[in-house]
Image (spheres, rainbow, N blue to C red):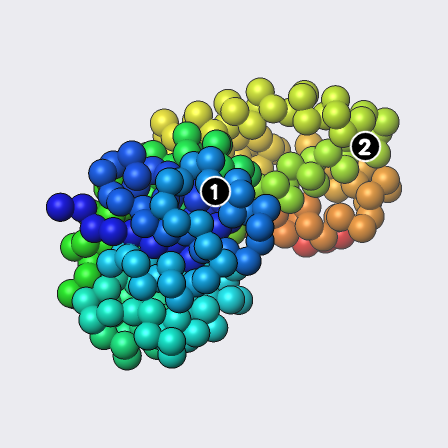
């Protein structure tokens, strides 16, 4: 028998999880939230009780997801625990990548088992999230008594579980942020360079998109170091020097960013084996000269 699920937090992630679990045979008995707009939206995806009463919603489930904003999770959990919304044997989970499971301590003290399952994915809206969640890897942080169930839950969501120690959550989340947030920032950096020579952001994103897609395909097939191409991978000092001179002239405020990224890329090129230590030193000296 699939367990009864309650979701506290009617945002994109909570509504998505409720919808998918419902299709997998779980009974989503309630979803709670503060925003009426979010609750109205959730109604079109989930058939259970829609309420602003988080304690009532939690008390109806055996599996309680707290999918509020990160800075609210601990206080929401405490409120439910203090008002006897948890039962002994309940499974209480949050889906934050950065937070320890210790923010669910009050549920643990109330007799529930606690865990965290975090999808390594970026969700813009519910419909996209429903399509993107299957195949996503989840970082799972849980005690011995609950991790088998947490793994099963991830599988039912269409995901792939990987075990993450609680003390490693911040580094685990930092890697995800580098992947998603810094990729966005990096592409914005490229757009700024194009803007400096009169190419609009609208045109530049269209122009670089085939390059982005091709690079991602290469990474998927060959891995990060072997997918590296370009002047640093070749040890092409002349081209790198031209980049530095042009950026210094037109965009001096981003020169240090180009240099730092370049220095890190030298190390990747060394791992690829496309340059040797002598070439790497020459490139780094050039990058550090400005």
Q: Residue 246, image x and y in percent?
A: 81, 37
- Which of pointers 2 and 1 indicates the residue nearer the eye? 1
Task: Please give the name of the residue rendered at 64% of the width and 44% of the height, measured from the top-left corner.
Answer: 185
Report whether 111 appears left or right of 17.
left
Q: Earlier in the sequence, mark 2 or mark 1?
A: 1
Residue shown at 30% from the left, 41% from the top: 21
The image shows residue 106 at horizontal and vertical percentages of: 35, 77
Q: Nearer the viewer, residue 83 or 101?
A: 83
Q: Is residue 90 left or right of residue 260?
A: left
Residue 114 in the image: above or below residue 217:
below
| Rendering coords of residue 120 (x, y %) | 41, 46
Q: Position of residue 73 (x, y in %)?
A: 46, 66
SS state under label 2:
helix
> Is any part of residue 114 visible from this angle?
yes
- Going 43% across and 36% down the picture, which residue do you hit? 45
Q: Is residue 173 visible?
A: no
Q: Residues within 10 Å of mark 2 (few under 14, many from 20)?
A: some
- Between 49 and 15, the residue placed more toward the observer is 49
Residue that mark 1 sits on:
42
Which residue appears at 41% of the width and 30% of the height?
131
Give the residue pinned by disc 2: 195
Residue furthest out toward the left: 1
What is the spatial separation of the Cα atoms under label 2 and label 1, in whole angstroms?
41 Å
Q: With respect to residue 181, does 109 lie above or below?
A: below
Describe the element under mark 1 as helix, strand or loop.
helix
Determine whether label 2 and label 1 are within 8 Å by CB.
Answer: no
Q: Quadrant of residue 191?
A: top right
Q: Is residue 193 left or right of residue 135?
A: right
Give above or below for 245 relative to 83. Answer: above
Could you say which is closer to the camera, residue 115 or residue 264? 115
């Amino acid at each position: 028998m699939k367990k009864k699920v309650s979701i506290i937090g009617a945002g994109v992630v909570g509504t998505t999880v409720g919808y998918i679990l419902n299709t997998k045979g779980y009974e989503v008995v309630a979803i709670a939230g503060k925003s009426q707009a979010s609750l109205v939206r959730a109604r079109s995806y989930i058939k259970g009780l829609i309420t602003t009463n988080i304690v009532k919603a939690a008390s109806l489930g055996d599996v309680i997801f707290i999918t509020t904003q990160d800075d609210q999770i601990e206080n929401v959990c405490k409120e439910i625990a203090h008002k006897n919304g948890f039962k002994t044997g309940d499974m209480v989970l949050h889906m934050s990548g950065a937070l320890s499971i210790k923010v669910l301590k009050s549920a643990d003290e109330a007799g529930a088992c606690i865990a965290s399952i975090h999808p390594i994915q970026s969700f813009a809206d519910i419909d996209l999230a429903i399509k993107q969640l299957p195949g996503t890897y989840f970082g799972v942080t849980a005690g011995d008594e609950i991790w088998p169930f947490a793994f099963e839950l991830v599988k039912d969501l269409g995901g792939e579980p990987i075990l993450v120690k609680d003390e490693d959550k911040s580094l685990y989340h930092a890697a995800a942020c580098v992947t998603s947030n810094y990729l966005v920032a990096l592409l914005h950096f490229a757009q700024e360079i194009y803007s400096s020579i009169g190419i609009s952001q609208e045109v530049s994103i269209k122009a670089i998109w085939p390059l982005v897609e091709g690079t991602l395909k290469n990474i998927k097939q060959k891995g990060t170091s072997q997918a590296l191409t370009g002047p640093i991978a070749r040890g092409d000092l002349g081209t790198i020097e031209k980049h530095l001179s042009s950026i210094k002239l037109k965009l001096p405020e981003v020169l240090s960013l180009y240099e730092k990224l370049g220095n890190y890329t030298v190390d990747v090129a060394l791992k690829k084996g496309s340059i040797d230590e002598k070439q790497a030193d020459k490139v780094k000296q050039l990058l550090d000269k400005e």
